[in-house]
Every structure is written in C-alpha cells, then in structure tokens.
Amino acid sequence: MELKIFAKDLSFPEGPIALKDGSVIVVELKSRHIKRIYPNGEQKIIATVYGAPNGAALGPNGEIYIVNNGGMSWVEHEGLIAPGPQPEDYIGGRVQIISPNGEVRDLYTHYEDGPILAPNDIIMDGAGGFYFTDHGQRREHDMDLGALSYGRLDGSMVKRLVSPLFTPNGVGISPDGKRVYISETITGRVWWWEILEPGILNFSTNNNGAKILAGLGGFTFFDSLAVDAAGNVNVATMPKGGITTISPEGEILDFVPVPIPDATVTNICFGGEDFGTAFITSSGTGILYETQWKNKGLELPFSDSLS
C-alpha cells in the first residue's frame, strides 16, 4: 500500500474531513486553524479559534462542528512535537460551530453537572445528534477522567453517556448504526456499546454495558478511529506510527505504517470516488497522507452539505 503526501508543513493536523471535490479539511491544533487543503496544493484557512480544535465533522447547511479541547501546551522530542499538559491559557472545553463564512460560535461549554473538559473527536449520527469523546485534562501531577458524550445539533441537550473513562479519544458508529466505538489512548483499547436509540445506550450488561473489541498490549496507545463499510475499526496507533485495522469480532487484521516514522499518527478518514481513498494525519511530522484503502469507507451524514 503506497502512502503519498497530500499536504505537508501542517501544524499538528487532526480531524480530517474528505470532501467530494477532492479537498480535505483538517484542524491544526498548534496553530489553532481549521484549514481546507485542495489537491493542487492550495491551503485556505477557514477559521481560527481560541483553545485548540481537536476534531471536526460536517453538519447541516455547510456548517462544520468542531470539538475544541480548550488549549494545549507543547513539547518537542527528536524534532517532533507532541501535546503536553494543560496550559495556563486553557479556556475550557467546548463544542463549536463554524458557519460557511468562517464565523465561530459556541454550541456547548457545559453539561448539566459540570464543564466539558477537553473534547477530542466527534461523529454525527444522522438522527439530529452527535457522539463525542471528552478526553479529560492532564496536569503536571493529576488529571481529570473523561467521558463518551452525546449532544443535539439544535443546542437543546448535551450529556455524558459513559463516565468515567480513561483518556477516551476516537469515536465511530458501525454501518448498521447499532454500535458506538471509542478508543482509549493510554490503555490502548477499543470499546463499544450497543445503541438502543440516538443518545441512549444499553447498560443492562456488566461493566455498564461496555464490551471490549480489542487491545494490542505492550507499549501501545490509540488515537482516533474511523469505521469502514465492512464494519472494521481503523484506529491510529502510537508510537508504532500507523493504522491498525480491527474486525467487528475483534480480530487484528492489518497494520499500515506511515513511510516517514512518526510516533503521533492520529487520524484516518475516507473520501474520494466511492470512499475508497484514506487520508491519514501524521501529526508530529505535520503530514497528511492519502492512499487507496483495502476497504471502502462509510459515507457520513451531511457529506453533501459543503461544496
């Protein structure tokens, strides 16, 4: 599988969204930009936010929904950058909407029982809402635990569904809409819950309804994920630097490394003709790769809302 550089010199890119015209939207955590990158190499800044945009999804009417973790500090090791602990200018986590003209507004900053801490990834459910992970915050000597959460697009409700979780990161929905998956970074595990109705999970089994899909063991972390049309979970894997593919039954099917070593490969999304192209963010090196993937991706809600 050949990975080609689609864009480089990005400022810790994550949250890719592949559009039907061949362009890709990414968030840049370090520069705080939301950027659209075209196949001819042109890069256009859509918006700049306070805090740090961590994940993105298309919404209705050409709007982009982003999860903003509230801000990050940065450390450098062997020429690569990586997130550090909570910074002094942390503004609190929030879910935001970017309008087609680049205006940024807050949709949610608090649950009923407390503040949103550091949302990381987001996926639309096609039923008027979205699931997102609230990663929690890390400081020098302590940390806040996170959650799998759910919000309505119209701003009427946001709630924690599963809490506490230990560094929840990626989130995805199975092709039949019956499972929601999350990856935990530090544990290196992927979990899933049965969806009964939008924003309502089945908690009737042990462990609050949680079922483990897979864990790689050893010194392995997970970042964000995307589910393909075959139902496989494709999850960014650190510090190995690539994408691990896991079947719906929990079998490890494959691992695809990036060609330039990077311990912080963070995201994958699907686009192109018939959603057969994968775009992968290699955040430490600031590269966005493209490649033809072995399975087609899922067409996500509102994929036609932004031209």
Image (spheres, rainbow, N blue to C red):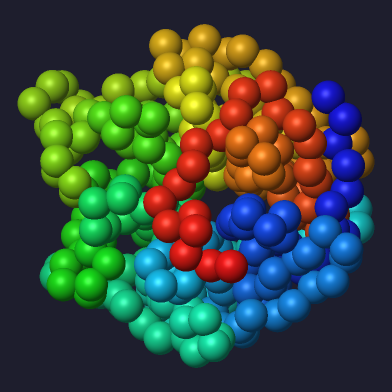
Q: Position of residue 148 (x, y in %)?
A: 31, 48
Vertical placement of residue 137 versus 146, above or below: below
Relative vertical location of residue 262 with respect to residue 88 in this rendering, above or below: above
Position of 189 with respect to 205 (left or right) is right
- In the rendered image, the vertical position of residue 297 relative to residue 204, given as above or below: below
- The N terminus sits in image quarter: top right
Q: Residue at x 37, y 37 (%)?
A: 173
| Residue that appears at 62% across and 57% down | 19
Judged from this view, the residue extending furthest toward the left is 204
Residue 223 appears in the figure: no
Q: Does 285 sit left or right of 103 as displayed?
A: right
Residue in view at x 53 percent, y 30 percent: 228
Q: Quadrant of the C terminus?
A: bottom right
Give the image quarter of residue 252.
top right
Left or right of 134 on screen, residue 30 = right
Inspect this view and state whether residue 266 appears: yes
Question: Residue 11, how many percent across, how many down?
Answer: 77, 68
Q: Is residue 231 above or below residue 158?
A: above
Front one among 278 and 266: 278
Q: How many marks do you count on the picture?
A: 0
The quarter of the displayed image where residue 73 is located: bottom right
Percent from the top left, x then y, of residue 26? Answer: 66, 63
Residue 64 percent location from the top left of the image = 48, 70
Depth check, front residue: 56 or 208: 56
Residue for point 50% across, 89% down = 103
